[in-house]
Amino acid sequence: MGTAVSTVMRGLRSGWMNANPITDAKTISVMEALDGFGYITTGFSFLMIGMVVFAHSWYVFLISVGSKAVPAVLALVHDLLLVIILLELFRTIINFLKTKTITLEPFLYICVIASTRRILTTGAQIAYMEDLPDQMFHRYLLDLGANVLVVLALVLAVYLVRRATPSAAVTVRERASG
């Protein structure tokens, strides 16, 4: 069995090695340009969606704040946290286009914001329920506890990532002295 696999792999490698290097470089160049275009259009999409959500959130808030102030404020906070998530994704794409590396930290921030958003949303829903069965209240407490643990774990992860990676200031000082 091992001999057959090695023969097939050797055949694949030999076909790959005989390819025209100019065509391969052009193909790769086109693919990289399309990849960059995909990131750019996705980034602009996140930005545009964030702007639409932002404007719509304030519109809904201004219409509903007079009759139900607290639910309107909670809905606005919920939507603004979604806008922050979208902007954080936009910023991550910008950083990727600049550095060609994807870092973990922005995604941890997004997860913290998403979990916080879930805590606020669930809390707002429970606060305005007139008849709350015990079973639903216990589910809420479990959901709340799980999200709090997620936030704590993510904050710990952010701390560990920051501690593991040298800051830009330290890198600049090291370069200046070296």
Image (cartoon, helix red, strand yellow):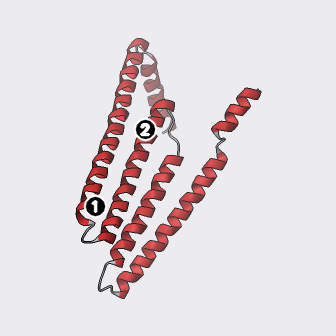
Question: Which structural element holds mark 2?
Answer: helix
Q: Quadrant of residue 25?
A: top left
144 above or below 62? below
Name the spot of residue 81 as percent of width and height, x first: 39, 56
Taking the image as shown, residue 173 lies to the left or right of residue 122, namely right
Mark linked to residue 93: 2
What is the total number of numbered labels drawn onto the structure image? 2
Distance of label 2 from label 1 (alpha carbons): 30 Å
Q: Residue at x 42, y 20 (%)?
A: 15
Question: Which structural element holds mark 1?
Answer: helix
Q: Residue at x 38, y 48 (%)?
A: 86
Name the spot of residue 39 as percent of width and height, x first: 37, 35
Residue highlighted by disc 1? 61
Q: Residue at x 45, y 53 (%)?
A: 110
Q: Quadrant of the C terminus?
A: top right
Q: Amino acid at mark 2?
A: Ile
Q: Nearer the viewer, mark 2 or mark 1?
A: 1
Q: Residue at x 56, y 58 (%)?
A: 155
Q: Quadrant of residue 169?
A: top right
